[in-house]
Amino acid sequence: MARAGSAAPGTPATVALTAAGIAFTAHTYAHDPATTNYGLEAATVLALDPDRVFKTLLADAEGRLVVGIVPVTGMLDLKSLAAAVGAKRAVMADPAVAERKTGYVVGGISPIGQKTALPTVLDETAALWETIYVSGGRRGFDIELAPDDLLRITGGKLADIAR
């Protein structure tokens, strides 16, 4: 795996990883503007097992924004995410709020380097892989890193939050 910052586009995610000394590999690809399933596009273009590519979703858990990171092949289980952060229920966050709070655009929201640090939960299936892929902070750019490093940089935790 490449050392942090090697030929990586400068995004808040790569800046944060570099500052923390966390190793990652940058993967860029030509994003098709007609595509709306960004994670599956990344898996296809990068020729990856889609269970290894994770999407970053924001939810409102009783008035508190939280981040759920799940495989692109699944869906976020809002009830499980709520329980993981000590809430009774959660709903998907408004996309405009998600963009404003993270500093990223939908389809390019990285769990790393967000403008506002938010409670983060990574689906437990991430532990099955030596490395996983998450958005690097823009459409057409993914970061490969170890799940433990993702948890360390986000202050997150593992839980069963996908269905």
Image (cartoon, helix red, strand yellow):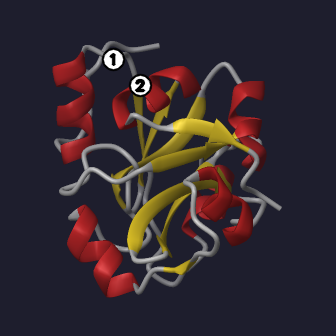
Q: Which residue is mark 2?
A: 152
Q: Amino acid at mark 2?
A: Arg
**N-terminal of the two: label 2 or label 1?**
1
Residue drawn at (72%, 69%) of the image: 79
Q: Is residue 139 left or right of residue 14?
A: right
Quadrant of the rendering where the C terminus is positioned: bottom right
In which quarter of the view is residue 89 placed? bottom right
Residue drawn at (24%, 68%) of the image: 101
Give yes or no for contact between labels 2 and 1 (Cβ–Cβ under 8 Å): yes
As rendered, which of 118 and 114 lies closer to the eye?
Answer: 118
Q: Residue lying furthest right in this view?
A: 163
Residue 129's spot in the image, x, y percent? 72, 25
Q: In this figure, what is the number of numbered marks?
A: 2
As rendered, which of 66 and 86 lies closer to the eye?
Answer: 86
- The answer to whether 123 is drawn above or below residue 148 in the figure is below
Q: Is residue 80 left or right of residue 121?
A: right
As rendered, which of 62 and 138 lies closer to the eye?
Answer: 62
Q: Which residue is mark 1?
A: 22
Residue drawn at (64%, 46%) of the image: 53
Q: Element under label 2?
A: helix
Residue 71's spot in the image, x, y percent? 70, 52
Mark 2 or 1: in front is 2
